[in-house]
Image: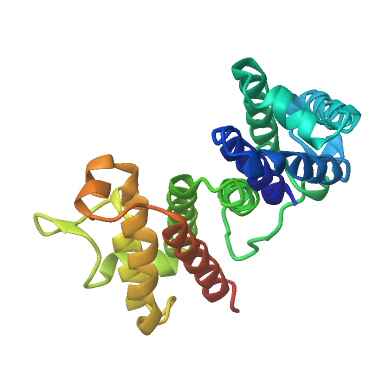
Amino acid sequence: MAGHIVTVAQTVKEFLTQWENVPVWRKIIPRCEVLVGEMNQLQPKNFEPDAQAEFVIVRQEVAEFHRGLNDQINLSSFVNSNRGDPAYRANLTAMMDRVIAVMEKYGGEDGATIRHFPFIKDADLRQIVERDYTEVKRRTYPARAWKSTVIMAGSVAEAMLFDILFSDPVTKTKAFASSVAPRKSGHTLPEDEWRLASLFAVAVDLGIVPKGRGATLDEVLRDYRNFVHPKKEIKAAHPCGEAEAGLAISGLDALCNFLEKP
């Protein structure tokens, strides 16, 4: 629902830029009606504490705006009176921006974690993984923040593999002894210097991640996460968009499924 609200608000913003197109401008009214209905189904308690009051205020403003639209004499009056007014368009755009901003702080029903990670032994790291996984699934991806989605997905994958390889002394010894462990000048690098590619390679070598899927997941989560560097995004010759974010989400879920198996 939160993602749908963001999408509708973004659509209204796009319509506002096409103010000379009367048929498009007419579509603003039903979209605002959708916003009112969807936002009325949400509870302030399910937002982050610092956003609860803002949500109530923005929801009320959207509702009052929609009531004002209904008070217009007719649809033609609304179109003719308002679409040519730059201040009107600017104010409505700002309202949609506030809707989008507050929805980014929506935590879901009761703010609950949507997936648990009992296989992560480090309690502090488990809490971080659960928080970040929930954020990427409930906020960045629904908000169409594609680059943030792939970066966070890679970060969560890195944290999970790090715990799997180094929290257990026996597995840690095997990881450092692996022939694909990262080395420099003949010495295995300290665990804090292992990158996601090395974590994947060793996890595959130890049989933790299936060999046939390891390379695919590595490519999806590692290469797209590197798009945090603008020059690497340019060098890749294709943008980090919706398709890439979808692949990263799917790859992350596949990795979770492999790691949580007994």
Q: Is residue 237 left or right of residue 258?
A: left
Which residue is located at x 63 percent, y 43 percent?
24
Q: Visible in this render: residue 138?
A: yes
Residue 199 at x, y percent in the picture:
35, 62
- Please indicate, yes or no, whether residue 173 appears anywhere in the rendered image: no
Quarter residue 257 falls in: bottom right
Question: The C terminus lies in which quarter of the figure?
Answer: bottom right
Please tell me which residue lies in front, 78 or 116: 78
Viewer-nearest residue: 2 or 221: 2
How is the structure coloured here? Answer: rainbow
Q: Nearer the viewer, residue 63 or 78?
A: 78
Number of marks: 0
Q: Is residue 244 above or below residue 127?
A: below
Along the line of sight, which residue is nearer the eye, 120 or 196? 196
The structure residue drawn at horizontal position 47% and vertical position 50%, both measured from the top left corner, is 146
Residue 154, by quadrant, is bottom left
At x 67%, y 31%, the residue is 96
In-image side of 219 versus 260 (left or right) = left
Q: Residue at x 51, y 68 (%)?
A: 250
Q: Position of residue 248 (x, y in %)?
A: 46, 61
Question: In screen coordinates, is 72 left or right of 194?
Answer: right
